[in-house]
Image (cartoon, rainbow, N blue to C red):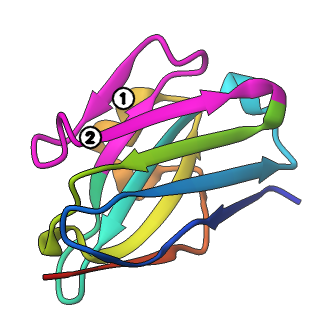
Amino acid sequence: QVQLVESGGGLVQAGGSLRLSCAASGLTFSTYAMGWFRQAPGKEREIVAALNWNGDITYYADSVKGRFTISRVNAKNTVYLQMDSLKPEDTAVYYCAADKSLVTMKVRYRDVEVWGQGTLVTVSS
């Protein structure tokens, strides 16, 4: 079956770094746009970053621009999120997502085709 499995979350101090990974299976990975979303307690899920099938088009939320980098390796069916200069407000459950459309990823997240189970990132002050 189609599956996205995130890893790499954890506890880090403010200013630190983490790298999240998302391994995909059961789908033709190179035909999907991929994205990272996050949801903090009591808040709506929001997009963090996304990229198209070959990675030459990327999108970042304003809150993470210059600090986070999304990338993918199609040969490994994996997408990454490098998070640097982390802030306490980055604390959330981070979800990997897959959809045929990068536009859907950006503007209609409720319609995204595939979601991972999430990984918790906690940034302490």
CB atoms at circles 2 and 1 under 8 Å apart?
Answer: yes
| Residue 42 is a magenta residue | no
Q: Residue at x 49, y 29 (%)?
A: 101
Residue closest to the eye, 89 or 18: 18
Quadrant of the image occupied by residue 30: top right
Tell how many labels. Answer: 2
Q: Amino acid at mark 2?
A: Val
Question: Is residue 84 toward the left or the right of residue 2 in the image?
Answer: left
At label 1, the amino acid type is Val
Residues rendered magenta in the picture: 48-75
Tell me the SS state at disc 1. Answer: helix
Residue that numbered label 1 is attached to? 103
Q: Residue at x 59, y 21 (%)?
A: 53
Residue 1 percent across, percent down from the top left: 89, 60
In the image, 116: left or right of 110? right
Q: Residue furthest bottom?
A: 42
Mark 2 and mark 1: Cα distance apart in space = 6 Å
Q: Which residue in the structure is indicated by mark 2?
A: 107
